Image (tube, rainbow, N blue to C red):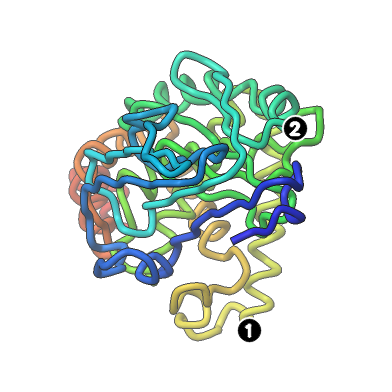
Amino acid sequence: WLAPVLTMGKEKPYLFSQGQPIANRSWIPTQDSPGIRQTWSATITVPDGLVAVMSGLRLTPGGVPAGDGHRSFYFRMDNPVPPYLIAMAVGDLAFRETGPRSGVWTEPAMLDAAVAEVGDVERMIDAAEALYGPYRWGRYDMLVLPPSFPYGGMENPTLTFLTPTIITGDRSNTDVVAHELAHSWSGNLVTNATWSDSWLNEGFTTYFENRIMEALYGPERAAMYADLDWDGMQRDIADAGGRNAPTTRLHGDPGATAGQLDYFKGSNFLKMIERTVGRERFDAYLRGYFDRHAFQPQTTAGFLTDIRANLVRGDRALERR
């Protein structure tokens, strides 16, 4: 809950939710585990002058009168999602399209700058689909939060939450948008069944993000991001106690990972597989992987079973490794 002083406009209050990893149990009566999947619908009634948005289909974009100076907004998510991806926000919000299936919500004073900053998003969606198959969530809208928003980004389906710090005027931080978009496949479509398997969300997404950036901006810029990730991995391994640190110190309880190790180490692991089998073959495998496990939870053991069955099996050189 944000007081008006914590917003850009400083006139109206603001509300946003953050469900990951296990916080939505505080306002939704659900078993709050990433291994659970559910469809949902919701009605949010707010005072006139405020707008409610959620991570689902907007059934009443402008709201409907609810009496006593209030308006109601109706939402629905038909795809089964893990509970942490149910999200909402309420505030003085304005919207503008950035393409046929994308747009930006934010406070009116930030709208022009936000739209200009994420202007490449439709190209990103096209690049992502060319790599790993169709975008299955309908719209890809973004909500740029007030200046006091304390997170980088959150991949809530149909409504990615973004930090306003990406708005620099030169699109130099659009890798954040690419990352959250990539989660539409790795994380939202195929979801880590437990938070100990979080590399299946974040490692895959970091790898996928880099591929989107390469497709849009070229291999040199993608290599720069990959080098930064490698350096980050080395720091996180050192901070966790070095290469011989117990596994639980590298990926354990929700929120207890060492830095971004599940992002960086997972991504570099996938890059190693790509180099081993070749990019074309690995891309074909990943497209099939997202199709085979769409809208399902996944474990590390499940991924290993899948890759052995669909990439390794029949390749004598790989089977000997």
Q: Quadrant of the C terminus?
A: bottom left
- Nearest the eye: 199 or 92: 92
Q: Is residue 304 visible?
A: yes
In the picture as drawn, the residue positioned furthest to the top comes out as: 100
- Nearest the eye: 141 or 277: 141
Residue at position x 23%, y 61% from top?
Answer: 36
Quadrant in which residue 215 is drawn: top right
Left/right placement of residue 14 relative to residue 132 reads right
Amino acid on which disc 1 is placed: Gly
Q: Residues within 10 Å of mark 1 (few under 14, many from 20)?
A: few
Residue at position x 39%, y 46% from top?
Answer: 186
For residue 306, above or below residue 176: below
Residue at position x 40%, y 46% from top?
Answer: 45
- Nearest the eye: 244 or 226: 226
- Percent from the top left, x then y, of residue 314? 18, 43
Q: Spatial distance from mark 2 to mark 1, Cα to Cα?
A: 46 Å
- Percent from the top left, x then y, of residue 26? 39, 71
Left/right placement of residue 204 relative to residue 265 reads left
- Percent from the top left, x then y, of residue 49? 57, 37
Element assignment for label 1: loop
Which label number is shown at residue 109? 2
Count of marks placed on residues: 2
For residue 54, above or below residue 122: below
Quadrant in which residue 277 is drawn: top left
Which label number is shown at residue 241? 1
Left/right placement of residue 167 relative to residue 212 reads right
Q: Is residue 271 visible?
A: no
Amino acid on which disc 2 is placed: Ala
Element assignment for label 2: helix
Marks 2 and 1, the one that precedes in the sequence: 2
